[in-house]
Amino acid sequence: MYFAKRCKRISVKVKDTIAPMIAFVILNIIILSLMTIFHPFTYRVHIKSWDIFHRPDITEGRCYHGMDQAYYLAPLAILHGIILFLAIQQLWVSRDLSTEFQESSHVFKSLLMILLVLFIGLPVLLLTRGNGNANLFTTSAITFVMCTSILGLMFIPKIRYEQHRKSQSDITVGGIGGIGGGGGDGDVGVTSSNINIDEDDDTEYNELILSTSNREELIVNNAKLNSDNDKLRKQIHDMQEQQQEEN
């Protein structure tokens, strides 16, 4: 958006977007590895009941953590919070960007779905804390919904767009299909350009930005262009009539 305001065109490549994610994953691996080496979680088994021969009948195992692990989990939580804040900030800045891969609405839907799941799942998780089976099912369900909501809303629209793009032999860019409307005296026609994309071509195409204006601004600009076209057609028609009278 900064370069768009300066009317400067830049090319964003895969390595430019994947570098922050690689750094984020490496920091997570380092923090978790240090915690596992120096202060790992302790696994304890509690006997819930005994049989008639005084043998353990029902046991329950659980991982426990204390203040030693908090020194690692706190920086990890801060790191994830910073990444989440930056992602929301970038989504807000690019909310009106009209591109082929506009995903702000999809990320907002996934975040809303996660909030709804946590709103219902966290109280259930606290209520089922003493029941191992119910607690495991609730935790697994929350994790499953959170992961599938993010992955599904991020990648399914892209997959559908890619299938739709491959089903077309070419893409028409522009939409200036004739100032005068085509056909008729005094009309000025401008042919729109085509970009032919060969399906066998392995060339990697960057994201095609069609406009940096939102929908309302595009409607106003379209109405203004139509008005200017009508005035230009009228001027051309008057000039032609004046030339005919002079001849």
Image (cartoon, rainbow, N blue to C red):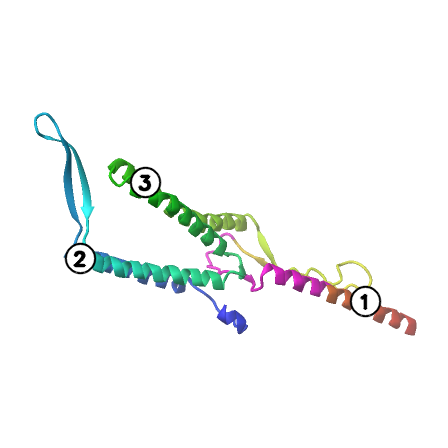
Q: Residue at x 50, y 50 (%)?
A: 162
User: Which residue is farthest left?
Assistant: 53
| Amino acid type of the residue tagged 1 in the rendering | Lys
User: Quadrant of the rendered structure where residue 193 is?
Assistant: bottom right
Q: Is residue 233 left or right of residue 246?
A: left
Residue 234: mark in rendering: 1
Helix, strand or loop at mark 2: helix
Q: Position of residue 190 (x, y in %)?
A: 70, 63
Give the class, few, some or many, for how many residues have Cα within 10 Å of label 1's Cα (few <14, many ≥20).
some
User: Quadrant of the rendered structure where residue 61 is?
Assistant: top left
Q: Residue at x 42, y 46 (%)?
A: 116
Q: Which residue is mark 3?
A: 138
State which tag comes first along the sequence, 2 or 1: 2
Q: Mark 2 and mark 3 in contact (Cβ < 8 Å)?
A: no
**Looking at the image, which is closer to me, 146 or 122?**
122
| Amino acid type of the residue tagged 2 in the rendering | Asp
Quarter holding the C terminus is: bottom right
Q: Which residue is mark 2?
A: 68
| Amino acid type of the residue tagged 3 in the rendering | Thr
Q: Is residue 21 left or right of residue 232?
A: left
User: Which residue is farthest top?
Assistant: 52
Cα separation, mark 3 vs mark 2, equals: 27 Å
The segment highlighted magenta reads: 199-226
Position of residue 39 relative to residue 43, above or below, is below
State which tag comes first along the sequence, 3 or 2: 2
Give the class, few, some or many, for how many residues have Cα within 10 Å of label 2's Cα (few <14, many ≥20).
few
